[in-house]
Amino acid sequence: MDIFNIFFIILTHTFVQETFSTFVAEICKGKLPSKLQAFSVAYDGDDSIYIFGGTGSFFDDKDREVIRRYSISTDRVESFAKFSPNLIYGTAMYNQAGFFYYFGGYEYSASEYFSNKIYQFHPSNKSVNTVGTLLPFRVYESADFQINSSTIYFWGGYGDDRLLFSYNGVTSSITKLRDLPISYNTGTALYDKIGEVAYIFGSEPRQSNNTAAPILTGAPIVEYNPNKDTLKIVYFSNFPGITSYMRASPVSDDKRRVGYIVGGYNSNGTILQVNYTTLHVCNISVQNIPGAENGTVFNRAGTVFVPKLDRIYILGGLLTRFNTTTDLVESTTVLEDIYYIDLRRGQDATETTTAPTTATPTTPTTSIPISADCAKKADGFYPDPDFCKAFFGCLAGKGSDYLCPKELLFDPAKLKCNFPHLVVCNFTCKNKPNGIYADPNPTKCDTFFGCMNGVKNSFKCPNLLVFDRSELRCNYPLFVKC
Ligand SMILES: *[C@@H]1O[C@H](CO)[C@@H](O)[C@H](O)[C@H]1NC(C)=O
Ligand SMILES: *[C@@H]1O[C@H](CO)[C@@H](O)[C@H](O)[C@H]1NC(C)=O
Ligand SMILES: *[C@@H]1O[C@H](CO)[C@@H](O)[C@H](O)[C@H]1NC(C)=O
Ligand SMILES: *[C@@H]1O[C@H](CO)[C@@H](O)[C@H](O)[C@H]1NC(C)=O
Ligand SMILES: *[C@@H]1O[C@H](CO)[C@@H](O)[C@H](O)[C@H]1NC(C)=O
Ligand SMILES: *[C@@H]1O[C@H](CO)[C@@H](O)[C@H](O)[C@H]1NC(C)=O
Ligand SMILES: *[C@@H]1O[C@H](CO)[C@@H](O)[C@H](O)[C@H]1NC(C)=O
Ligand SMILES: *[C@@H]1O[C@H](CO)[C@@H](O)[C@H](O)[C@H]1NC(C)=O
Ligand SMILES: *[C@@H]1O[C@H](CO)[C@@H](O)[C@H](O)[C@H]1NC(C)=O
C-alpha cells in the first residue's frame, strides 16, 4: 500500500453515518387530457403506453370512448384511436405479436352493464375489433397476468370474485381452471416469470366459499403456478395488506426478480418492493408520490415498468382521503398527472444507506479527466474541476487520480469525499477553451454547458435524453450510464 492510500483511508475514515433516499417520483410534462381513473394501461415494450377507456368521475360519460397513447420519448399524450363502447374497469394487455387485447369491464351505456367482449386493438391501423366473448365469466377490476404471447389468466375480480380462468389467444377460448380458496374485494396480481408463479392478492380477503365470512387477517395471498395448475396460500412478510375497497397497481421487474406495488394502502409516501425469492416486502420512500399524507390512499393508478429506462411510470389514479378518527371516506380526487420513478437512482441510494469508510483509488479512464498536474502543487488532495466525483493527490510533484465511492462527491472545502448535498459542485468556464462541457456534477444527467470566451451558457437535453459525457452530446438514456 503506498503512502497515498494510507493518507486516503485516514482522510475518508471520518464519514458521518447518514441515510437518505433519492427515490423521486418525477412529474412528467405530459398529462392526461383530464382527470382519469378506471382506465387500463398496456405498454408496447418500446415507446408507447396505451390508455384504454376510463372516466373522470363516476357516471360521467366523457372520455371513455378513446384509446390514448402516451409517448415516453416525447412525453406527450394523444388521443389515438376510437374505442367505440363506453368502457371502464376492464383489462388491457399487450400481445407480443404487436397488438393489444381489452377484456371485459363495465359498459355504462349497455343494458347489462358488464361487458363480456374481448377486443383486439392494432396500433398499426388503429383498428378495434371484437374477437370473442368472456361468457360465462366476467372481468372487472380483475387480477390478471400473462405468461406468454398466447395465454392470459384472470381472477375475475368484482365480477366473479373467486374464479380463476384462462384465455388462449390462439384458439380464442376461455377455460375455467378452478375456484380460489380466497375471494378479494378488489384484486391484483404479480407474475414472477422466472419462478413461474403468480401472486394474487387484494383487499378484504375472505374465505371464498362463504362470502359472509369475516375478513381474513394477515393479508393472505394466493400463489398460483399456471404450468402445474397448483396453488398455495402464502404471506409476504412486512406486507401491510390492501385497504378495504382500494386497489393496488402492480408491476414486475423480471431482471431483478422483484415486484412493485404502487398504492392501495396507507402508503405514507412509499411504494412496496416484493422480493420473489424471499417474499419479503421492503417499503421504499419515494419523494413527491401521491398519497404521502397520513389518512390518504393512492389507488387505481395505471402503472408500467419500462425496462430499457429502468423506470416505473405511474398514470392518473385516485386519491382517497379518510378521516383518521372515524376511518370514513372524506373525499376523493381524480388525478391527471404522469410520474416516473427512476429505479437506477434509487438503486444507488439503497446501496449507499451505509456510508463507506474507504474509497477506491482508480486508474484513470477516458471518462475521468486526468487532472494531476502536480508539478507546481503542494502535497495534498485537489478537486477535479471537470468532474466532482474525481480528485487527485500530489506528493513530491507526482500525481494520482481517485474517484469518490458510491454517490459521494469530492468536497473542495473539506478536502474529502462527502455527501452530494453538502458539496457545491458548479461548472465554471474559467480557464476553459470555447466548447461544450459536461456538468461536473455526476447526478445532473441532462444538463451541459457551453463556454464562449469565458462566458457560461447552460443547456438541458430535450425530452428524456441525457448528456453523454464520452460523446459530448445528448443521447438516449439506454446508451448512457448516468
Ligand atoms: C389492421 O391490421 C391487422 C394486423 O395487421 C389486421 O389483422 C386487421 O384486419 C387490420 N384491420 C383493418 C380494419 O384494416
Ligand atoms: C370452505 O372451504 C374450505 C377450504 O377451502 C373448507 O375447509 C371448508 O370446509 C369449506 N366450508 C364450507 C362451509 O364448505
Ligand atoms: C403458453 O403457456 C401455455 C400454458 O403453459 C402453454 O400451453 C402454451 O403452449 C404456451 N404457448 C406458447 C406460445 O409458449
Ligand atoms: C415500513 O416498514 C417499517 C418496518 O419494516 C414499518 O415499521 C413501517 O410502518 C412501514 N411503513 C409503511 C408506510 O408501510
Ligand atoms: C411516515 O414516513 C415518515 C418519513 O419517512 C416516517 O418518519 C414515519 O415514521 C412514517 N410513519 C409511518 C406510520 O410509517
Ligand atoms: C432478494 O432476496 C435474495 C435472497 O435474500 C437476494 O439474494 C436478492 O439480492 C434480493 N433481491 C433484491 C433485488 O434485493
Ligand atoms: C373526522 O370526523 C370527526 C367525527 O365525525 C369530526 O369531528 C372531525 O372534524 C373529522 N376530521 C376532519 C379532519 O374532518
Ligand atoms: C396516521 O393515522 C392513524 C390513524 O388515526 C394513526 O394511528 C397514526 O398514528 C397516524 N400516523 C402518523 C405518522 O401520523
Ligand atoms: C452553485 O449552483 C447553485 C445552483 O445553481 C447556486 O445556487 C450557487 O449559488 C452556486 N454556487 C457557486 C459558488 O457558484
Image: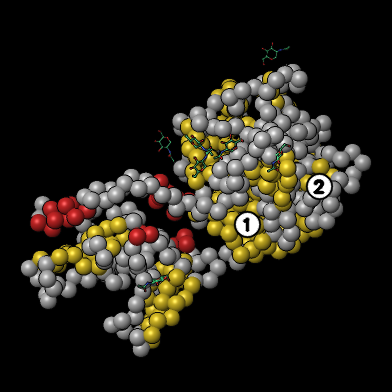
Image vertical order of residue 271 relative to residue 374, above or below: above
- Mark 2 or mark 1: whose residue is earlier in sequence: 2
Q: Are marks 2 and 1 in contact (CB under 8 Å)?
A: no
Q: Residue at x 57, y 64 (%)?
A: 73
Instruction: Find disc 1 in the rendering and name its residue.
Output: 338
Where is residue 287? Give x, y as percent.
52, 52
In the image shown, does 361 or 264 lie closer to the viewer?
A: 264
Q: Is residue 188 at least partly visible in the picture?
A: no
Residue 458 higher or lower than 398, as above or below: below
Q: Please, what secondary structure does the residue beneath circle 2 have?
A: loop
Name which residue type carries label 2: Phe
Res 85 visible: yes
Q: In the rendered view, would you say 351 is above or below 379?
A: above
Tell which quarter ligand 9 is in: bottom left
Q: Amino acid at mark 1?
A: Ile
The tag on residue 58 is 2
Measuring 38% from the left and 85% from the top, which residue is drawn there?
Answer: 455
